[in-house]
Each structure stands twice: as C-alpha cells, then as structure tokens.
Image: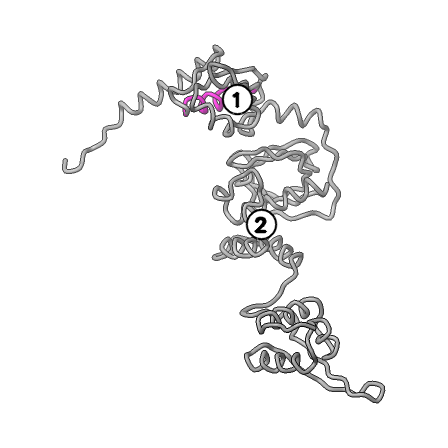
Amino acid sequence: MGTKTSIESTTAIFVAYRQKRVWTQAQLAKEVDVTVKTLRRWLVAMRAAGVPLESEEDIVGGSRQVYWSMRRNWYPEGVLVAPETLAAVCEHLGWAPEAPGRDELLHLLRGMLGVEGSAGAWSSGELSATEEAHLSLIEKALAGEQALEVLYSSKSSDERERVVTVCQIARGIPVRFLVFDHEAKDYRRFRLDGVKQVRLSSLPAMSCDPHEVEQIMGSMADGFHDGSASIEHQFLVRYPEAHWVASNLLPGMKPKRTKEGLLVTAKVSATTIVARFVVGLGAAATALTEELRVEVERLARGALSRVNEVTVEKPGN
C-alpha cells in the first residue's frame, strides 16, 4: 500500500463512486488503496468542503460496520446523467415545437454528448442545432432499419406528418434525403431544412428497392430531378481550381482528373442546376456538352443584363 497524494486520493474516491454509490469504509479503503484511517480523514475533509457524502454505522454479525454513500448522480457543479439518457432528451427536444432557447439547449446537450458535427460529411457550421438533432435521428433510422414519423413542409406541398422509410441520404448543404412514403407508397425527396419535427416510429422500415433508389439518386443533382429524361452533361474545371472543386461537387457529379483539368460528368434531368454550378465557377469552368453550354450562356447573359439594369449610387451622391 503506497503513499498517495491528496489529488490522487480524491480522484480515486470520485472514480470509485462513479462505479457505485454506497461503500463500506473497509471496501472503499481497499479500492482506493489506502488505510482505513487515511480514507476516513479524506472523506471527512471532502464532506467539509461540500461534497455530499453521508456516513452511517451499523452492527453486522456483532461487529461495527461503517457505510459511506454519495448523493445519487452528484457531480461538482452539476449532476451525472447517463449518455443514453442525455441522447433521449435530445431526441425529445428535436421533436418538440419551436420555442425560444430550444436550439441553444440542443447545441449544449449535444456538445456534452461529444457529437458536435456528428452529421459526418456535412459541416456542422452549416447546420443549426435543431437540424443536427433531426439529421442524427434520420441517420439512426437508416442504420437501424426503423421508420420515421416526419412533419415536413415544402413550397409544393402542405405541412403534414408522414410515416416514412429513409432510403438514402445525399451529402451537401442543404442536406437532402430520399424516403419511401408508407401511405402514398411512393418515393419522396426531402430537404433537411424542410423537416419541422421528427421522431423514430414504432413501425419497422419498409423495403427500398435498391435499383429504384440508385436510379432516382443517380438522376438528381443537388437532390432534384424535374421528371424529364436524364441527359449526360460534362464540364471541365482548370487547375488549380480543380483541386478544391473535386471535393465540393454536387451529388450525382462524377469527377475524373485529366491533364487539362477536372472532367466532371453529371447524368441528370435538371440541367439548370448543373449550369448554375458551372456559372458559379466563373472562368475556371468550361461547359463541354451543347445543352449545358446553352444553359450556362443563358444564365450568364441574364446575370449580366441585371447588372446593367441596376444602378448603384455612390456615397455622397
């Protein structure tokens, strides 16, 4: 039994009480590896400092037994909560209606769980605390093959609750995910920022057809397709811009490095979305396929015409 410093002894005592709440004096002394006399001195000092320790004596088998206990779930300046309990609180808060301070509280609790940015590929800096909580449940439903109850709102449909099966999640900001609607018996494309409330359902997930899912996901860029036939578009991004563009492509875009730059192929029906992406790259990108080139030119001309129409007054005029 070696000599321990006050810090070592106090730490060992706290660790012991994390394991169980009540110890006999003799058991705790053995666990902490000090004499009973030393242990008692430290316990009395800790109680005097404000640690909620209680002692109780009893006669067991004719001999005196001393018990020391610590208040359940106590921790300095707070309380101890099991991670699974805290995760459940986050889930319920994510389902709760919008209220002042809810997002801040969710952000704080998820930080305690060590899941800041748990959305993986999506940047937590781009997601609110509520969106992160919603995404966590969506990922959990996908991994655990469990249905979701989602209150969803979009410009094209009324806000209503649906029971869905999550089929796939598309990376990007905004995050989009493909679901199978249990009532409509059809696939739906949702945006994370359109989710108002979400919770795990007691119903099991339905089967998503892998071929259909691949077809739908492959035909959409940035999570959308407009119902028309898919067309293969290509554009080239020059170096050095190609290096960062390669890791920031929209879903459905497939890159290939060449001597001239990054050759990007996208087989989609929503030509405008791809064209907007190309226009956003400015002189660094060149549309190679005819339909994409025409749409890029149309968007660029439209933007230039607006610039010519708007007159910006200089300060002092």
Q: Which mark is residue 270?
A: 1
User: What is the C-alpha distance between the residues marked 2 and 1?
Assistant: 35 Å
Farthest residue, direction front: 2
Q: Residues within 10 Å of mark 1 (few under 14, many from 20)?
A: many
Circle 1: residue type: Ala
- Write the residue at 42% across / 17% down: 296
- Write the residue at 66% across / 25% down: 214
Where does the image place residue 137, in percent across and percent down from the top left? Answer: 63, 46
Circle 2: residue type: Val
Q: Quadrant of the N terminus?
A: bottom right
Where does the image place residue 32, in percent across and percent down from the top left? Answer: 68, 72
Farthest residue, direction top: 290
- Write the residue at 63% across / 25% down: 216
**Secondary structure type for disc 1:** loop
Task: Name which quarter of the figure residue 79 lies in.
Answer: bottom right
Task: Name which quarter of the figure residue 224 lies in.
Answer: top right
Residue under numbered circle 2: 115
